């Protein structure tokens, strides 16, 4: 989990598969980020802002009741307590700071469910930058409240009508727009995906999650690292940031949990999409398949290239959780600990609930990154549970 160097390769994955017109923009960004990341004053300003504005460091909470029920010691890294309710702010604040160093006055972003769009609009408001967010037209209908949030924050939301009118199409459109406006515009990409330097840069901006958690766990676990470190995986940024903090904790097993219907690593095959070579959901003809999951934040048809590499070399393993188990985990964590998780984060919890006493031996210590809070999902979960009412299941 080091620096992939100028080619941006993680083993056979990663790289920079972009049109000629974007090569210079990616190189300029890589250069600016390398300089910033080597500059102690940048780190100081980044961490100070994440503390005073973002609410960092987020705590690690020990789940005493659930631990007792499960027979494992469960710790949660609480990204749900960060400003805007998830880990996403770390990435957008960092990228906005790099954009300012490059003299850009405008941010563009893609968004699926709207969470990365809201985070980018937040950073743009904080820095007084212009902001345009590309969002699939279907998603603007499904996530109307997030569209309004972005507008409240001063951003313009542009609906994308091409393709399936979802996240994949929004990324394509944002990349096209970046080519045309690169002089004054930074493309604030939302996860550890896309062309080099994004997968590396976003992982580095998110490593604050893992670095904090490592120290916090050691203090709770009398100097040891957890036996397992678990995080949900959409594009893979909260998992990458978490895993980075435990890179040399070789006794800690790293586990990424994908949505069953968006399991790019578990059932995908290598290919090129959005400027990177990685594991992708494809049909027999090589066409990208739409991912399907109850959690909009996990239904990206690809995964960050570094995760594909970590799986290939066996440093991390990737598993899945299905919608029904995720709904159960959502309710169980709420009741047992008073923490309503994001549906994305509930995937990581669901895997731990399913495997405690099985693949996770009794007495293990398990750190789960709780990537976000569940307020945004409460109405959807109510509808999903309502649809099951009358079947005899507890609601
Ligand atoms: C966006 C999001 C995710 C998925 O993104 P990653 O890049 O895989 O971290 C997971 N959890 C929450 C709460 C999110 O908002």
Image (cartoon, rainbow, N blue to C red):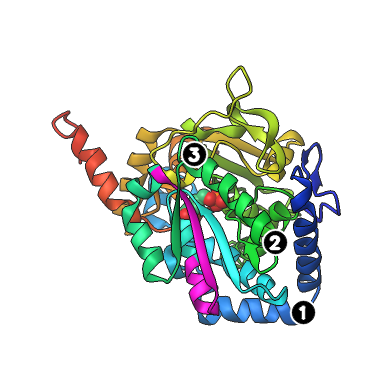
State the residue at coordinates (58%, 79%). 49
Whole-Å distance between the Cαs marked 3 and 1?
A: 43 Å
Tell me the residue at 64%/66% (across/down).
Answer: 185
Q: CA distance from mark 3 to mark 2?
A: 32 Å
Residue plotted at (58% across, 42% down) = 256
Which one is nearer the viewer's eye here, 127 or 325? Answer: 127
Q: Which residues are magenta?
A: 121-137
- Quick one: 56 or 379, which is closer to the camera? 379
Q: From the viewer's perspective, is residue 350 above or below residue 148?
A: above
User: In the image, residue 165 lies at what x, y percent?
Assistant: 45, 40
In which quadrant will I find the C terminus?
Answer: top left
Q: Secondary structure at mark 1?
A: helix
The tag earlier along the polypeptide, 3 or 1, is 1
SS category of the residue bearing label 3? loop
Q: Where is residue 138 drawn, in percent x and y?
A: 39, 42
Q: Which mark is residue 40?
A: 1
Please tell me how crowded label 2 is: few (under 14), some (14-19), or many (20+) other residues with Cα within 10 Å.
many
Which residue matches tag 2? 204
Mark 1 or mark 2: name the one nearer the start of the chain.
Answer: 1
Is residue 87 in sight in this rendering?
no
Q: Is residue 323 left or right of residue 280?
A: left
Q: Residue furthest left?
A: 390
Task: Report whether the residue tagged 2 is closer than 8 Å to ligand 1.
Answer: no
Q: What is the CA distance from the residue labelled 1 to the residue labelled 2?
A: 14 Å
**122 part of magenta stretch:** yes
Q: Report crowding for label 3: few under 14, some 14 to 19, many 20 or more residues within 10 A (C-alpha).
A: some
Callout 2 secondary element: helix
Pointer 3 residue = 162
Quadrant of res 314? top right
Residue 110 seen from this side:
yes
């Amino acid at each position: 989990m080091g620096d992939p160097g100028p080619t941006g390769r993680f083993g056979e994955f990663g790289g920079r598969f972009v049109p000629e017109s974007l090569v210079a923009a990616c190189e300029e960004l890589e250069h600016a980020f390398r300089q910033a990341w080597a500059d102690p004053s940048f780190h100081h300003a980044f961490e100070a802002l994440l503390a005073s504005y973002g609410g960092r460091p987020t705590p690690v909470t020990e789940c005493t009741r659930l631990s007792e029920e499960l027979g494992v010691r469960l710790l949660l890294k609480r990204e749900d307590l960060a400003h805007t309710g998830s880990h996403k702010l770390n990435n957008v604040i960092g990228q906005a700071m790099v954009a300012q160093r490059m003299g850009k006055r405008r941010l563009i972003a893609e968004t699926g469910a709207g969470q990365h769009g809201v985070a980018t609009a937040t950073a743009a408001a904080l820095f007084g930058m212009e902001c345009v967010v590309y969002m699939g037209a279907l998603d603007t209908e499904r996530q109307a409240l997030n569209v309004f949030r972005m507008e409240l924050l001063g951003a313009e939301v542009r609906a994308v009508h091409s393709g399936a009118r979802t996240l994949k199409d929004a990324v394509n459109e944002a990349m096209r727009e970046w080519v045309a406006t690169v002089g004054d515009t930074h493309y604030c990409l939302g996860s550890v995906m896309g062309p080099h330097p994004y997968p590396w840069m976003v992982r580095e901006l998110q490593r604050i999650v893992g670095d904090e958690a490592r120290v916090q766990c050691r203090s709770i676990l009398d100097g040891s690292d957890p036996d397992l470190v678990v995080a949900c995986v959409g594009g893979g940024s909260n998992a990458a940031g978490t895993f980075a903090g435990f890179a040399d904790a070789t006794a800690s097993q790293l586990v990424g949990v994908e949505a069953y219907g968006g399991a790019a690593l578990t059932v995908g095959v290598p290919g090129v999409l959005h400027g990177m070579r990685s594991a992708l959901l494809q049909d027999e003809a090589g066409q990208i398949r739409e991912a399907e999951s109850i959690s909009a934040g996990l239904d990206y048809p690809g995964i960050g290239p570094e995760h594909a590499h970590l799986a290939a070399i066996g440093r991390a393993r990737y598993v899945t959780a299905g919608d029904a188990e995720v709904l159960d985990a959502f309710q169980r964590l709420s009741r047992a600990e008073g923490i309503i998780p994001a549906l994305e984060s509930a995937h990581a919890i669901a895997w731990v609930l399913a495997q405690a006493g099985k693949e996770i031996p009794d007495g293990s210590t398990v750190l789960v990154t709780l990537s976000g809070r569940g307020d945004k999902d409460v109405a959807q979960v109510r509808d999903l549970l309502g649809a099951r009412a009358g079947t005899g299941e507890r609601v």
